[in-house]
Image (cartoon, coloured by chain):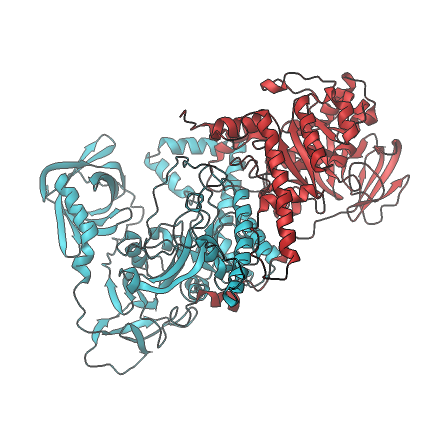
Amino acid sequence: MIKNITLSFLLLCSFQMLKAQVETGDILIKNGTVITITDGVLEDTDVLIRDGKISKIGKDLASGNAKTIDAAGQYVMPGIIDAHSHIALDVVNEATDPNTSDVFVGDAIDPFDVAIYRALAGGVTTSHAMHGSANAVGGQCETIKHRWGVSNPDDMKMDGAPRTIKFALGENPMRVHGEGNRIVPRTRMGVEQIFRQGFAKAQDYQAEWKAYKANPAGALEPPKYDLKMETMSDILNGDIIIHCHSYRADEILMLVDVLDDFGVKKICFQHVNEGFKVAPELAAYGAGASVFADWWAYKFEVYYSTAYNATILTRNGVVTSINSDSGELIRHLFHEAAKTQRYGDLTDNEALKLITLNPAIQLGIQDRVGSIEVGKEGDIAIFDKHPLSVYAIPQMTIVDGVVRFDIKNDNDDVRIDINPEEKISSFIDHHAETEADRCMQDVYEYFADQKQD
Amino acid sequence: MKQLSVLFLVMVFGFHGFSQDIPPVTDKILIKNVSITTQPGSTPFIGHILIEDGIIKDVGASLQVPYDAQVVSGDSLHAYAGFIAALSHAGLKAPKENNERPRVDRTGYPPNDVAGITPEMSIDDAYDHKDGSISDMRKQGFTISHSVPHGRMLPGMGSIIALNGESYNESVIVKDGSMFAQWKTANRVFPGTLIGIMSKWRELYRNAELTLQHNKNYKTNPRNRKRPAQDAATEALWPVVQKQMPVFFKAEKHRDIYRTLQLQEDLGFDLVLSEAKDIDRILGDLGGRDVSVLLSLDLPKAEKKKEESKDKKKDGEEKKEDKKEDAEKEDPKMAMLQKRKSEAIDRYTSQAKMMSEKGMPVSFSYLETKASDIHTNIKRLITDGLSEKDALSALTTQAAKSIGISDIAGTIEKGKLGNLVIATKPIFDEKSKIKMVMIDGKLHEYEVKEKKKKKEGDSEMIDPSGTWAYTIEIPGMAASGTMTITKNGEDFDVKVTSNQNPGEEAEGKEVELDGSDMSFSFSMPAGGMDITVQNELTFDGDTFEGTVSVADFGSFDISGSKSDPE
């Protein structure tokens, strides 16, 4: 009886409205020092954004009906891209299995996370919202644009960006599953087997479905639909870019071997603190590397590190980026990039590429963002000084031609969503805490009840 | 004390036997001279309602009365169709929360019951017709509930139940008509997070489609085919994938709502968004489409009115907390945060109005609301702009529609179920009290006590010190004893004894006096656990009246008088 209602008056619509039109804008940025990344630095130059896309770069451009911003004496660079973050997520780790390729953090986007606004205040327009590193094969990730102010989680997503997935090597998956649950992987060897089993089973799975579909409809019992195997198959098919949490050189080469055995090419190593030891091998495989400028020694496997890592990788021809993995670091990635000039003497453009075009390449979105070029998306960060100067302060951040951060209009309380049940004083207490290394968020409780039996 | 608890067990578990086993003299009841609102928005008129055999036989200003009908006077009373809870847990006890991590071989692959995936469950076994939630809802005017099981992501199917306090078989109106789902994860096994629930839904749904097809094929021609394996959970989803059974999906906050809509978009099931608290941000996207949403009545706590605290200041009754709050208000930063919090509360209490303005029908779900808060909260929604017509429709016609029983319930109409609510004043009047609730032609009466009018500025504290004799009215029996109240500085101590068990004492906790109203609780062991008895008393000279209530069991009237008058 209840079913009748749905026919009579319920969802006759199918919620196609979930993909709302993303807001775009028209802006003319006048007389700035334009750091294009791909075409040098253009002094005293205008950048015109129309319908959210860069339509003209040149001198004395007419604004038409576009909003005009005077950037005289200021530096205009492409919006910064962070290839590794966990902001804007309600859930980071589904830590219940060594392989959780079936889950997808795109299902858990929180457009009201104040960290998005803070990232914008650091000139960051795009970030890679990643699953955590509790599992050897973690969940699928989401590339988001920092459209602060939208309430539909879908509007945060960078529509059309390639699919990505988190893998993790070393201590984190060993601790969670080996120590925590007493199952494979307890060792680094075990971690390798999770990948090999995952891919091998996916090959069987593909064969099963192929056989099923080759027969006339209804002839065979359908195979079980397995979302993990679906995802692993998609990786084998080259539809998903792997972003792998890694530190040690031996393990990095291990994963390269595994992927080579299964014919998987799209791989970007994350953290990759010992990447400097295997830079030629990474370059030869076409693997990317997304590193910290100078963050290490927070666990045993992260001691053998150097601040020259980014430079060594770059000089060896590895597409390298610098990431935050933190709601705090993400606010000053331009400082992090500048450290490569102190440690390694990268040029201005090489250093800025680490936080613009290179992370874009690693995420497969280099045709759309990462440089100031006609036809690319209107994602811009404006600084009062050269962004690699320690005195630089971001002034304005633009996403799709829409101003999402303006230092002149920077309210104390920028929250969009307010919990009506929360004590007002707890807002201050809660946000005073700094969060670091969210890679293992939601996981520590897993160690709380280990029993020695 | 022991006897006191035995007494309580009797009154708690046994009173149905006393009150309801007496067979009715006649199955014809006439409610005479009552103000009748047949449906939301219709003009009330004085008339009569004849109920025969549990069905409304006739309604009108003048009608033929059978000689053998029991006549109930409706003078100065107001009759409405019995209220309908479009979604609640009425009749189903919440299981004890267990925070221990279940012991399973692989945390990524726990058995379905551990994962919280039991869509095959009906409420028939778990339904407890003596559960206090049923009488509590009935007392608020509810006659029918669409009751769904407790649990995790997929607890099971819902049934539509008459809240008559009879057994499941005698109460059930629609068995297993809906699927209930929520965003409640398993305990540190898969699905341990919201993204795990998303993935599990996608996998279950796709497999239900596949196995359904294979079973159909096998049925048509089993020869030369592999026998399909049985799987209770997947098979329970077959009616869902065939859109023969709607999913009532509990999704409170806006992101959970979006996730629910995402699943609906991906998979295509029929959806009733339930227990929504924060829907206005989505209304723009819905663009006035015909979507069924059940709003939560679990509203954020109302803020104290300023005048009150000022009065208290004058009276020198200011508490420390108030001082702290005032200090916060004086700090401009805190004042700004406080302002935003107030706006947030207003936003939550304006949800119903905003839905109405978009032309979307409003109805409620009651999964998170205490029965005794229902009318208070509906009045808050009305204060914030929901029309009384829409409020009444949310309780009657719209609720009936959203669970598919408009044919038989929701209005006072010939041929519909004899379900009525009869109140002392128009139902949304501040002073309105529910006097009678009829379910299937059976009358449940409630004693209505007019609160003494407080005189203007009468916030004077009385001193109830002394020894009081009390009587608790439990249908079919009485419990009595004494209550000793002694002043202890600013506060009061309360000691409760029972005549049925002299010598034992229970001590009152959280004793609070507000004017002439006193509240306190005491706990006592019963059946291996401690039950808490909540007392709300109003003193008037040498007498008091009030209620005692026990969580999950219900509430009873209490009255008393001073046994040592000065």
Residue A306, above or below B298 = above
Residue B331 horizontal/vertical position (percent):
51, 31
Q: Which residue lies furthest to the front in this view?
A: B224
Horizontal and vertical percent for residue A322?
72, 27
Tell me if A93 is positioned left or right of B402 in this view: right
Q: In this view, does B501 lie above or below A435?
A: below
Please identify the quarter of the rendering in which residue A364 is found: top right
| Quadrant (top left, top right, bottom left, bottom right) of the C terminus of chain A | top left
Question: Measuring 66% from the left and 22% from the top, which residue is drawn there?
Answer: A248
Chain A appears what colour?
Answer: red
- Along the line of sight, the residue nearer the viewer: A185 or B342: A185
Q: Is residue A411 visible?
A: no
Q: Can residue A48 be seen in this view?
A: yes
Q: Chain B is drawn in which colour?
A: cyan
Which of the two residues, A240 or B172, is positioned nearer the viewer here? A240
Q: Name the residue: 87% across, 40% down.
A: A57
At 35% across and 38% down in the image, what residue appears? B312
- For the image, the number of numbered tags is 0
Q: Which residue is drawn at 29% across and 54% down?
A: B128
Q: Where is residue A24 in the image (x, y as percent from the top left)?
A: 74, 48
Q: Is A296 placed left or right of A321 in the picture?
A: left
Rendered image quadrant of residue B463: top left
